[in-house]
Amino acid sequence: MSKNISLSSATIMQVLPSLVTGGVERGTVDVAKAITNDGGRSIVVSSGGPMTHELVRSGVEHFQMNVESKNPINIWKNIGRLVKIIQQNKVDIIHLRSRAPAWSGWFAAKKTNTPFVTTFHGTYSGYNNPIKRRYNKIMANGVRVIAISDFIAGHIRQSYGVKNSSIRIIPRGFDPKNFNAQNISHERKIKLAKQWRLPDDKLVIMLPGRLTRWKGQINFIRAINKLDKNQIHVLIVGSDQGRIKYKNELEMEIKKLKLENTINIIGHCDDMPAAYMLTDVVVSASTEPEAFGRVAVEGQAMGRMVVATDHGGSKETIVNGRTGWLVQPNDTNSLADAIRVALTISPQERSVIAHNAIEHVHLRYTNELMCLRTLETYKELLTKNVTSS
């Protein structure tokens, strides 16, 4: 029923800390555009950032407010500010995407009797700590709680007691235009290959992801040490985000294993589609479960051979042996074995897996599907007499 309802008479307000590049931000912008395209009025509240211009160009209204602050005084002050925006703009639904602004938004929703939706983006640290657990629980208070994977849905049911009737599982989406091998020019690949000084005669293995311990770079380095170093070149791609000590630890591990000529640590990459196209095998070695696992999905979309650890979102996004390989977490032997298989399969087998992977993610994980399902959730609420809990 909700699919046939238009948002033409509805105003939807999304609230998030900032509009700096990231998964939460990308999803917010995509949904904001989809609301406008469906005829609705789209409002985003954030502290601003580089993606603000993209919103404005798409006809989305942006209200700048310091909602990224975790300071209780600021959170309290933001309640009144959000109430004013809600009332003046006759907001029908509030969508809260992060914990600090969610606390302000929850009180504002109660004061204005406005239904609100939350998106649970991760497990959040400290849920066994009573204080942090209470802080995190705000994300479970929506009249609809969007979980970005089955794994996250299970987590919020078990850890926060959210009822199935309130949960909507809407995986994150990738952009099929950007992550499409046919749309990557030779110039883009050559530029990046020269920048990274990639050898022409070696197979390339890449682990993308910010430099943080749970992303498993240490295990990845140790797994690489078990492979034939004469045939491979390895890239660890991602920003250290100020974690200089951890980056130094990775460099020391590389030096200790005498892998300086095999592994390069690359910083942030602005052209990940081209980076995937330079790669033979893409690895996600996370030691903790990924809430969704963007790398595994993007790698499959580009037709790369993908190896990921068998927990969290990756269990859902990869069909083991058909679209990629899943390995036991924290097991460098099985990780090395899977990479070795991915490197040595025949061209025919590689082609079949690439085809399966591309088809698999296009059917399930595009940003178009993510937006469609999110808008369906909004429309569902518009047809029901529901308010904030």
Image (cartoon, rainbow, N blue to C red):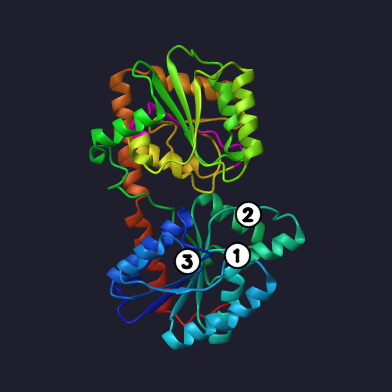
Q: Which residue in the structure is indicated by mark 1?
A: 99
Q: Are marks 2 and 3 in contact (CB under 8 Å)?
A: no
In the rendered image, the quadrant that contains the N terminus is bottom left
How far across and how far down the image is residue 140, in percent?
59, 65
Horizontal arrangement in the rendering, residue 111 relative to residue 171 (left or right)? right
How far across and how far down the image is residue 43, in percent?
41, 74
Residue at image point 60% right, 58% down: 156
Q: Are marks 2 and 1 in contact (CB under 8 Å)?
A: yes
Q: Which residue in the structure is indicated by mark 2?
A: 124
Give the magenta part as a residue range: 276-288
* Spatial separation of the CA atoms under disc 2 and disc 3: 23 Å
Amino acid carrying mark 3 in the image: Gly
Amino acid carrying mark 1 in the image: Arg
Q: Categorize mark 1 by other alpha carbons within 10 Å: few (<14), some (14-19), many (20+).
A: many
How far across and how far down the image is residue 305, in percent?
39, 29
> In the current view of this chain or complex, which residue is farthest to the bottom?
88
SS type, badge 3: loop
